[in-house]
Amino acid sequence: MTANTGHRLIDREERTRKKPMKILVLGLCRTGTSSISAALRKLGYTPHHMREVFANPWQTPIWHEAINVTLLPPSKRPSNQRSLPPYGREEFDKLLGEYDAVTDLPAAIFVEPLVEAYPDAKVILTLRNYESWERSMQNSIWKLFTWKLFQLVRILNISKFGPLMRMTQAGFEVLNGNSYGGPKSKAGFEAHNDLVRRVVPKDRLLEFGPDFRWEPLCEFLGEEVPKGEYPRLNESKAMQDALVILRLPAQLRFHGP
């Protein structure tokens, strides 16, 4: 248990765990995480997904703090967070107490902390070919960091979207040093998957994909196969549409009507 220092945002939260954590989906974003989130909901679970951060803005600064104090070395943290203790079971229970599963960013990058915090949870590593993943990322999330307009939004903190962008960028600093393609990005992608395989016992781990079907998922979870096809959501298309929606208000803010 981490000592309550009173200096972290999470220490002010009084939320508690309401249901046991059962499933950790630790594959990176754009590896079928939206689809498996939908699949888990159909099976009766309550998964956390990046959409939950969008819908609950209070989570953004806390996830950002979690990344800084738990995953980044002190030299890369803000000066006021360099001596703060990392997140553990107590902190994740406050942040994730309403969920019995996690998927997608930002949770997926907390491989060792979450596996240690929830030793009874089953772990799923969603898989995708790296080259396909890179193309998808460059057409979606990484545009947040390469479009100059969004860079200004992030740096100047002129909208509610700025904190979310900075939190996400901190996550990619952990994953690949904010490399948006190329050898360093590929190395980070592969290192993440290798870390999951290394720290999770084989009897707790399902490597899932790129052929996503109900049967292996339900067998691993001990659930009956539901009627209907496995969900196949177009994550990249949804993200691109969201970026267009987000870009317009930013353009109006800078240029006026």
Image: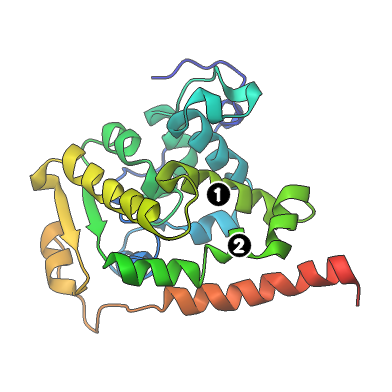
Residue 16 lies left or right of residue 125; in this view the side is: right
Of residues 32 and 173, the one nearer the viewer is 173
Q: Which residue is mark 2?
A: 146
Of residues 14 and 115, the one nearer the viewer is 115
Q: Secondary structure at mark 1?
A: helix
Colour scheme of the picture: rainbow
Between the C-alphas of marks 2 and 1, the distance is: 11 Å
Q: Crowding near pointer 2: few (<14 within 10 Å), some, many (20+)? A: few
Q: Quadrant of residue 216?
A: bottom left
Quick check: 11 above or below 243? Answer: above
Which residue is farthest front?
183
Which residue is farthest bottom?
228
Residue at image x 55%, y 49%?
169
Of residues 243 and 4, the one nearer the viewer is 243
Amino acid type, callout 1:
Gln
Q: Which residue is mark 1?
A: 169
